[in-house]
Structure formats: structure tokens, C-alpha cells
Image (tube, rainbow, N blue to C red):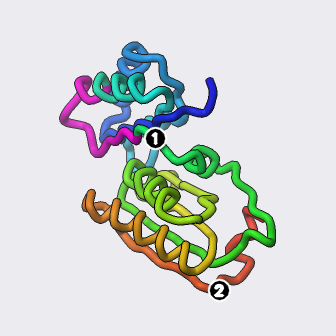
Amino acid sequence: MATPKSIGAIELSSITLGYRVQDEMLDAADVEVLIARTICSGKYFIVLGGSVSDVQAAIRAGLRGTDESIIDHLVIPNVHESVFPALGQSVTIGEAEVGALGVVETFSGVSVIAAADAAAKAARVTLFRIHVAMALGGKGFCLMTGTVADCRAGVSAAAAEARQRGLLVAETVIARPHRELFSEYI
């Protein structure tokens, strides 16, 4: 499948129901599973990609599957292309690309995807990591770099998205970070 135009995600409080919901979503539409796994603390997380209509149909089917265990969900119709490599943790950045460091932390995996997309659309930042809920007690965080002004704009947009969902933990921009903070990505 080519790079999807749309992304959808559902976070569930039940692992058992997560498997059933994932199956129902795959039956409902032609989508690609980008992430489907258990996450901390005993939850199930599903991220799908595909055309806007297919992702919308899959998420609708997933939401019909269970109301009680849905923690959060989203559909982003025209997701920013930098979300996919950052979510897949496949971004490397060159020394020349390292600038300020922006970090946004949320209470859920779904909300951090929405926040990262908002950051990438609002500012000229490089998203280099979107981490969802593994070894974080169910939280998520995203990392971005760029000029100080762009990181501030990106972090502000991301934090506003998470805050609107009631799921913002913290946000920061470090104007001149030590290079060691980027050591995994250079």
C-alpha cells in the first residue's frame, strides 16, 4: 500500500475486545494495520492507514464493536506525511538539522498522534519520534526539532490539540539542547 492519506486510531481498555475490534475494522474496509498491540497498562492500541473513506468506515466499525472499553479514538483525513516515519521510529536527523527540541507528552497514544499531526501542520518542524504508550504507563510523547520559533509554534499547536482532548501532561521547548538528547537519532 502507498503512503496512506488518512490515519485512524482506537485505544481500548480491554485487550480481549481490542482483538475483536481490530478484526471488525479489517472486515469493514481496505485499510493497512500500522500498529496493533497491547500497551501499558493492560490496554490495546490500533492504528490504521488508508483512504479517507476506508479509514472512516473502519473506525466506525470499531466504535460499534464496543462502547464500554473505548478510551480514545481519532480519524485524521489528511495526515501530515511526517507522522508515519516518526510513528514508525524510523527517522534519523543530520547534525545540520538539529535545532531546538520540542516535547509534548499526553495521557494517551491516540492523543499524541493528533498532537504530532497538529505540530507538523502548524510549523516547519521535523517530527522525529512519536512514542505511544510502551513502558510509559499508557502515555505518549512526540519529539520535534527546528528553529526555536518553529518548535514553539509546533509545540503550541500540539499542546492545544492534546489540551482540547483533556489529555495534555506537559509541553516544553529547549532552545539549545545538548546534542546527547538527539544521540539515538543522529
Q: Which mark is residue 78?
A: 1
| Residues in magenta, as a range | 62-76
Q: Is residue 72 magenta?
A: yes
- Toward the left, the furthest residue is 68
Comparing 7 with 121, the one in front is 121
In space, the residues marked 1 and 2 are separated at their CA atoms by 32 Å
Tag 1 secondary structure: loop
Q: From where the camera sits, is residue 19 visible?
A: no
- Amino acid residing under circle 1: Asn
Q: Give the foreground label among 1 and 2.
A: 1
Tag 2 secondary structure: loop
Residue at 40% across / 13% down in the picture? 27
Q: Is residue 68 above or below residue 137?
A: above
Q: Is residue 47 above or below residue 87?
A: above
Asked which quadrant contains residue 63, the reply is top left
Q: Which mark is residue 54?
A: none
Left or right placement of residue 150 versus residue 53 in this view: right
